[in-house]
Image (cartoon, rainbow, N blue to C red):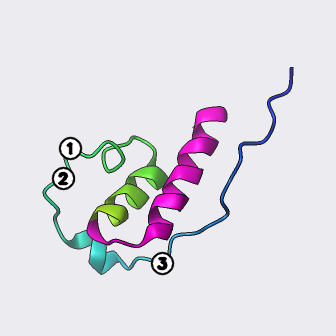
Amino acid sequence: MTIPPVPQTGRTSPTAGDRLLRQNHPHDQRDMFATDPNREIKQLGRVALRRTEPDDYFALGDLCARQSVTPA
């Protein structure tokens, strides 16, 4: 049985500079995306905590959907 491709929105997160991620956020140690073992999910989760850009959340959803079907 073949699993069909995971639906994707195709939206991408605007580039976040390292300066943004150097700032501590109170939820860095509690947020499930910011503490994810997958490096890409963790980075995008931390970015999403620090700004209100909707594309961050769409990109995070796409990434998690892909990871739920394909191994890390």
Instruction: Provide the secondary structure element on which disc 2 rests.
Output: loop
Q: Which residue is mark 3?
A: 15
* Callout 1 amino acid: Arg
Q: Quadrant location of residue 66?
A: top right
Q: In this rendering, would 50 be left or right of 13?
A: left
Q: Are marks 1 and 3 in contact (CB under 8 Å)?
A: no
Residue 65 x/y as whole percent: 59, 43
Q: Which residue is mark 1?
A: 30
* Callout 3 amino acid: Thr
Front residue of 30 and 8: 8
Mark 1 crowdedness (10 Å alpha carbons): few <14, some 14-19, many ≥20: few
At 50% from the left edge and 69% from the top edge, which residue is drawn?
Answer: 55
- What are the residue bounds of the magenta stretch? 50-72
Front residue of 72 and 34: 34
Q: Quadrant location of residue 72?
A: top right
At 85% from the left edge and 26% from the top edge, which residue is drawn?
Answer: 2
Instruction: Provide the secondary structure element on which disc 1 rests.
Output: loop
Q: Are marks 1 and 2 in contact (CB under 8 Å)?
A: yes
- Which mark, residue 49? none
* Majority secondary structure of magenta residues: helix
Front residue of 58 and 17: 58
Tell me which numbered mark, 1 or 3, is placed earlier along the sequence.
3
Give how far apart the Cα atoms at labels 2 and 3 are: 21 Å
Q: Which residue is mark 2?
A: 27
Give how far apart the Cα atoms at labels 1 and 2 are: 5 Å
32 vs 11: above or below: above
* Callout 2 amino acid: His
Image quarter where the N terminus lies is top right
Q: In this rendering, would 21 be left or right of 71?
A: left
